[in-house]
Every structure is written in structure tokens, then in C-alpha cells.
Amino acid sequence: MAKTFGMLFGIIFLAIGILGFVPGITTNDMLLGIFMVNKAHSIVHIASGAIFLIASMSGAGAARLWFQIFGLVYAVVAVMGFVVGDGMIFNLISNNQNDTWLHVALAVVMLAIGFGTPKQAA
């Protein structure tokens, strides 16, 4: 199950990262007019997607591990989002309130998958 979710997350993160560079979909640093993005933010999404895909192809254990790692990372990013508000996280990644709440949701889902799915593929 973690492998399947990892593939899905990989595809979604790659797509969102790429869309961050597409004019019209991202205008005035706003992805879909909702999420604040910059080049670094989009590159992080592309890298996250690639890691999810590679981990998922490596097996259920690798996929679970990366869900655990990314779940913790996104939890930290969410907390930092609440701290900085509309601004820059780690002076690198642009953020707004919508980003912060999305990061909270992603952290919860990723941690649930990372710690709640079976260790071995069924």
C-alpha cells in the first residue's frame, strides 16, 4: 500500500512542481491563484516527487521510510509556516496561510501512511 501511495504522491508532487514554472497556472508567484510559490518551492516539490517515485520503485519499506521522513519534514515546515506567516521559510521557500495548512494536512497524511501501513507488501 505504501508503494502505491508513494507512486501517487510522486506523480502529484512532480506535476505540482512543474506547474510552478508554467505561466498562466502560476501568476505573480501564486500557483492556481491559491498557493504562494517560488523557484525553490517548485524545485523542492519536483525533488520530493522524484524521491517518492524512486523509493516506491525500491519497495514498500523504502516508501514507508520516505513517508516518515517527509511527514516529519512537512510538519516542521508547517510549524515554520505558522511562525513566519506570509513570508519566507528558512529564507528560501515562499509561504502563505494556504501553504501552511496544506503542509499540515500533508504531514498528517504522510505520517499516517509512513507509520500506519504494513511493513511488507501484501
Image (tube, grey):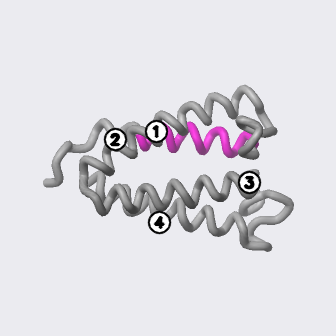
**Please, what is the three-letter code of the amino acid marked with disc 4?**
Ile
Label 2 close to label 1 by CB (< 8 Å): yes
For the stretch drawn in magenta, the main secondary structure is helix
**Front residue of 98 and 120:** 120
Considering every residue shown, the one lying at the far left of the view is 122
Which of pointers 3 and 4 lies earlier in the amino acid sequence?
A: 4
Mark 2 vs mark 1, CA separation in Å: 8 Å
Q: Which mark is residue 19?
A: none
Disc 1: which residue: 71
Quadrant location, the N terminus: bottom left
SS category of the residue bearing label 1: helix
- Residue at horizontal 72 percent and vertical 52 percent from the top: 35
User: What percent of the width, then of the height, locates residue 46?
Assistant: 57, 61
Disc 3: which residue: 37
Q: Which mark is residue 114?
A: 2
Quarter location, residue 113: top left
User: What percent of the width, then of the height, locates residue 112?
Assistant: 36, 38
Label 3 close to label 4 by CB (< 8 Å): no
When the figure is inspected, residue 114 is found, relative to residue 1, above or below; the finding is above
- Residue at horizontal 62 percent and vertical 28 percent from the top: 79
Which of pointers 4 and 2 lies earlier in the amino acid sequence?
A: 4
43 relative position to 68: left or right: right
Q: Answer few, some or many: residues within 10 Å of disc 4's Cα (few below 14, many 20 plus, some between 14 and 19).
A: some
Which of pointers 2 and 1 lies earlier in the amino acid sequence?
A: 1
Quarter location, residue 83: top right
**Please, what is the three-letter code of the amino acid marked with disc 2?**
Gly
Disc 4: which residue: 11
- Numbered range of the magenta stretch: 95-110
**Please, what is the three-letter code of the amino acid marked with disc 3?**
Val
Label 1 close to label 3 by CB (< 8 Å): no
- Residue at horizontal 75 percent and vertical 51 percent from the top: 36
